[in-house]
Image: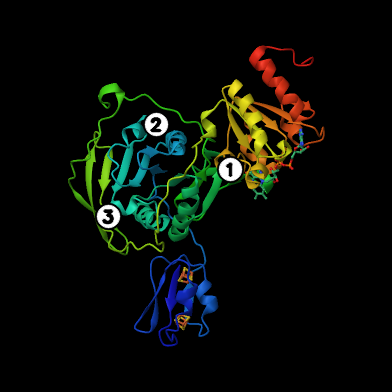
Amino acid sequence: MEIKVDESTCTGCSLCKNVCMYDAIDIVGKKAAINENCVFCGACIDICKFKSIEITGLSQGYKDFSQYKGVMVFIEQQPGSIADVSYELLSEGKKLADALGTELTGILLGYNLSQSYPEIFKYGTDRLYVIDNEIFENNLDDIYAKALVQVIHRFKPDIFLAGATGFGRTLIPKVAAIIKTGLTADCTSLAIDPEKKILLQTRPTFGGNVLATIITRNARPQMATVRPHVMEKKQIDVKPGEGGSNGKPDVDIAKHAESISLGGPDSNICKSGEDYNGRVEYIELDISNFKTKYKLIATEKETGQSINLTDYDVIVSGGRGIGGPENFGLLKELADALGGVVGASRAAVDSNWISYPHQVGQTGKTVNPKAYIACGISGAIQHLAGMQTSDIIIAINKDPDAPIFKVANYGIVGDLFEIIPKLIKRIKYGNNLIQN
Ligand SMILES: Cc1cc2nc3c(=O)[nH]c(=O)nc-3n(C[C@H](O)[C@H](O)[C@H](O)COP(=O)(O)OP(=O)(O)OC[C@H]3O[C@@H](n4cnc5c(N)ncnc54)[C@H](O)[C@@H]3O)c2cc1C
Ligand code: SF4
Ligand code: SF4
C-alpha cells in the first residue's frame, strides 16, 4: 500500500495536516508531505478539496510472513517494578513459543532499568531487549509507540503480546496502527492452531455472552493484549550456571559492544551489548526524531491508601444496595474478619462512596479470589466480567431474581443490614447465625 500527494494540485492549505491524528503530514515548501507515521486511515483524502491525495495498492495478495519469528512480550514497568501482567504474559508466551518451537523474547523500555530484569528470566524468557533512556521516564505512549515500532520492524516477531492495562490500552493500538497489523484487545485465552501454526486469540464479545476466536490473517505480527490476572503467572526453573546467588540471574548491563542499525526510514543507529549469557541485548536508540504531542505539566502520586484487590483471597464487595459510603464500614468489618479486602461495583464508585481502585468489573479490576462476597450488587454483565472466575461466589441481595444469583455458588436472599452483622458475629465469635 502506498499513499501519494499530487504536488501539481496540492495548494499546501494544511487541511490534511490538521485532520491527521497520527502526525503523518508535514507541509514542506507549500506542499503536503506524508511521512512513515501514516496508518492509511484515509481522513486526509476525504478532507482534501483538490483530490490531491491517493492511496494505491489496496488489494491484498499472498503475503510471505516467513521473516516473522518468535513471541515477543512488551514488559511494562513503573519505576522500580514490573507489572505483574508482564510475568503472566511471559508465562503464556513461553507456552506459545514452545508450541511453535520458537524463541520467547521480552522488550523492556524505561529509564534506569538495571535493577529490574533478573526476575524476567524466571518466566522462560530466552532473550531480553532493553532500551534505557530518560525519554521513557514519564511513560508517554506516543514516544513508546515510536520505539516499539522500530523494535518490531527490526526483530520481526511473529506474535507480540502486551498487558491490557491503562497504559497498554493507549500504547498498543497506536503501535498496531502504525505497523498496520491487527490487534485483538482484552483476550482471555491464547493458543496456537496446531495445523496452521497461527495465533488463536479468544476474547469475550457481545457483553461477555459469546467468546470470539480471532486470527490475524493478512498482517504480522499477530498482536494481542490480555487483561491482568487472566493468565497464570508461572516461574520455570533457572538452570544451573545461569543464575547468580539466590538463583537470580546475574545481570550487568555495563558491557555494550557491537553496533547494529534498527533500519527503517529513519535509519536509527543503536548500540547493542550482550549479557546474562548473551540473553540481554541493550539497545540505545537515536531519539532525535522522537517528539511527543503531550505537554507534561506535573506528575502527582496517587494520594490515599493504595489498594490492590488481587492481592487478597477474600473480597467483600458492596454495590448500590449498601445505601451510602458510611456503610462500607460494615463490609470492612466482615472483610477484616475474613482477612480480606473491600471491593465495589461501579455504581458505588460512581456515587463517590469508595475510590476507583476498589472497583471490580469490565472497567475496573478483574479478580479471582477464593471467595467473592457480593453485597447489594445486582450482577450486571459488566460487573460479572470482573469477578465470575472467583472460586466461590456468595451473593447477598434482597431481590431473589437478581442476576447475581445465577453465578453465585451460595445465595442469601434478604436485607444485607440484617445478614452481614450476623455473619460477622458468627465468624468472630462463632454465634449461631439464625438465632442471633
Ligand atoms: C461500558 C460499561 C462499563 C461498566 N463497567 C462496570 C464495572 O467495571 N463494574 C461494575 O460493577 N459495573 C460496571 N458497569 C455498570 C453496570 O452496568 C451496572 O450499572 C452496575 O454494576 C450496577 O451496580 P450495582 O449492582 O451496585 O447497582 P444496582 O444494579 O442498582 O443493584 C443494586 C442491588 O442491590 C440490591 N439491594 C438494595 N438494597 C439492598 C439491601 N438492603 N440488602 C440487599 N440487597 C439490596 C438490589 O436488589 C439490587 O439488586 C458498566 C457499565 C457500562 C455501560
Ligand atoms: S488538503 Fe490537499 S491541497 Fe491541502 S495541503 Fe493537504 S493535500 Fe494539499
Ligand atoms: S491517511 Fe490518515 S494517517 Fe495517513 S496521512 Fe492521511 S490522515 Fe494521516
Q: Residue at x 44, y 46 (%)?
A: 160
Q: Residue at x 54, y 48 (%)?
A: 185
Crowd class of label 3 (few under 14; some 14 to 19; many from 20; radius 10 Å): many
Residue 123 marker = 2
In the rendered structure, which disc, 2 or 3, sits on the residue that comes first in sequence? Answer: 2
Residue 252 visible to an observer of this rendering: yes
Relative to 151, is 59 on the left or the right? right
Crowd class of label 2 (few under 14; some 14 to 19; many from 20; radius 10 Å): many
The residue lying toward the viewer, choosing from 312 and 168, is 312
In the rendered structure, which disc, 3 or 1, sits on the residue that comes first in sequence? Answer: 3
Residue found farthest to the front:
326
Amino acid type shown at disc 1: Gly
Amino acid type shown at disc 2: Tyr
- Mark 1 and mark 2: Cα distance apart in space: 27 Å
Q: Which residue is mark 1?
A: 364
Please say if the residues under marks 1 and 2 sit with CB atoms less than 8 Å apart.
no
Q: Which residue is mark 3?
A: 285
The residue lying toward the viewer, choosing from 162 and 410, is 410
In the rendered structure, which disc, 1 or 2, sits on the residue that comes first in sequence? Answer: 2
Asked if 258 appears above or below 236 in the picture, the reply is below
Element on which disc 2 rests? helix
Closer mark to the observer between disc 3 and disc 1: 1
For the N terminus, the quadrant is bottom left
